[in-house]
Amino acid sequence: MKNTPALTLHIPEPKYRPGDTPDFSDLKLSEAGAVRRPDIAVEPHEIHDLAFTLIRVLDDKSQAVGPWDPKLDIDTLKRGLRAMMLTRVYDDRMYRAQRQGKTSFYMKCLGEEAVAVAQAMALDRDDMCFPTYRQQGLLIARDYPLLDMMCQVYSNERDPLKGRQLPVMYSSKEFGFFSISGNLGTQFSQAVGWAMASAYKNGDRIAAAWIGDGSTAEGDFHHALTFAAVYRAPVLLNVVNNQWAISSYHGIAGGERSTFASRAIGYGIPGLRVDGNDFLAVYAATQWAADRARMNLGPTVLELYTYRAEGHSTSDDPTQYRPADEPGGWPLGDPVNRLTKHLVARGAWSEAEHKALTDELTEQVKAIGKEAEKYGTLGNSTLPSVKTMFEDVYKEVPWHLRKQRQELGV
């Protein structure tokens, strides 16, 4: 007989469930300003440690410290704060609209606004973004019309996508926002392919893609890293680690064993782990990776370490699988509050200004919301003409579709 124990299967479980008292004191968080910032031409094997530390700029006194401080001017910081606040106000209104039956479902990005907004501002306006469904801040930071966003969520007659996409799955070629895919992970492969094509044509545009921590368990993640590494594709591969993939915590996707940024190491790609609730850190790391891509130095994997403060969507109740007060205990705080405090510390912002901006954005979104509802909401709208189903698919409509359209009399 073998003198060995019986085999057991390890099934990852979150540390805390409903009714437990959450405690994040065991998280290994680097001190603000403590992580080194290498030259963009560094060899990936020389910075393996950056996949396990955490790039942070804002300290406990709301001061920007350390080598990753991007030295942003006050106007840029205020634009970032405004875009994050506008994203939050927009989210709140559309969430309420879903609860009122005006749309089928909605997905908020509460607590993750710095990821999309800071990265949009660090990238060039012409760079192509391949997002997942919690990066509405990319469009808002690029001044995409809120009216079009709302009409797409309502699937009304003014929907720019003509009813072809689910709510919150926006798309705009003009604003460099690739159509969101409901099949998780696909955008990573698509972004790498797009970036390879840009390089092959000797262009100057790079790509960036976003997925959640759970999607790193999909094959598309590994396919994308393989091609990105082999061909040195000019692409930023962002993993938004918000701790939860619907009701499964990140350990199910491997986050219990190592960081998601460390997966880049096996492919010979730089991996950076970033405080996703620190606007300045996200901006600086994105800028570093973008500069590297533009200099033909290849891809970078960025793990944005953050927390999903709300449910996965309006169809989800997070209190069924995590403590109700867990979001409030997240040690990296709230991205809007942290940038606000930094501006106050620099003498460039006040409580009165913050309230005034909140009121302004609330009224702006309210007015646009009323305008959007004039064109209809779910079940109360004039649908786009049947003839639109033949449009925007082929550059030249093939004969059999022309015939079908004629048969329909449209």
Image: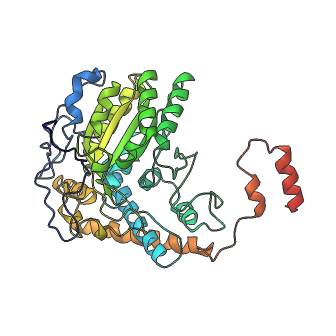
* Left-right relation of 186 to 271: right
Residue 335 position by quadrant:
bottom left
Position in image of residue 359 (x %, y %): 36, 72
Choose between 167 and 172: the one closer to the eye: 167
Choose between 381 and 12: the one closer to the eye: 12
* Left-right relation of 362 to 145: left
Q: Is residue 73 visible?
A: no
Q: Where the N terminus falls, by quadrant?
A: top left
Instruction: Please report the residue visible at 62 percent of the width from the left and 74 percent of the height from the top.
Output: 376
Instruction: Please report the residue visible at 76 percent of the width from the left and 62 percent of the height from the top.
Output: 386
Judge whether 225 appears above or below 135 on screen.
Answer: above
Position in image of residue 80 (x %, y %): 34, 52
Position in image of residue 365 (x %, y %): 46, 69
Judge whether 348 appears above or below 325 on screen.
Answer: above
Residue 313 position by quadrant:
bottom left
Instruction: Please report the residue visible at 18 percent of the width from the left and 55 percent of the height from the top.
Output: 347
- Looking at the image, the residue that sits furthest to the front is 1
- Looking at the image, the residue that sits furthest to the bottom is 100
Position in image of residue 342 (x %, y %): 20, 53
Residue 374 position by quadrant:
bottom right
Q: Where the C terminus falls, by quadrant?
A: bottom right
Instruction: Please report the residue visible at 29 percent of the width from the left and 44 percent of the height from the top.
Output: 254
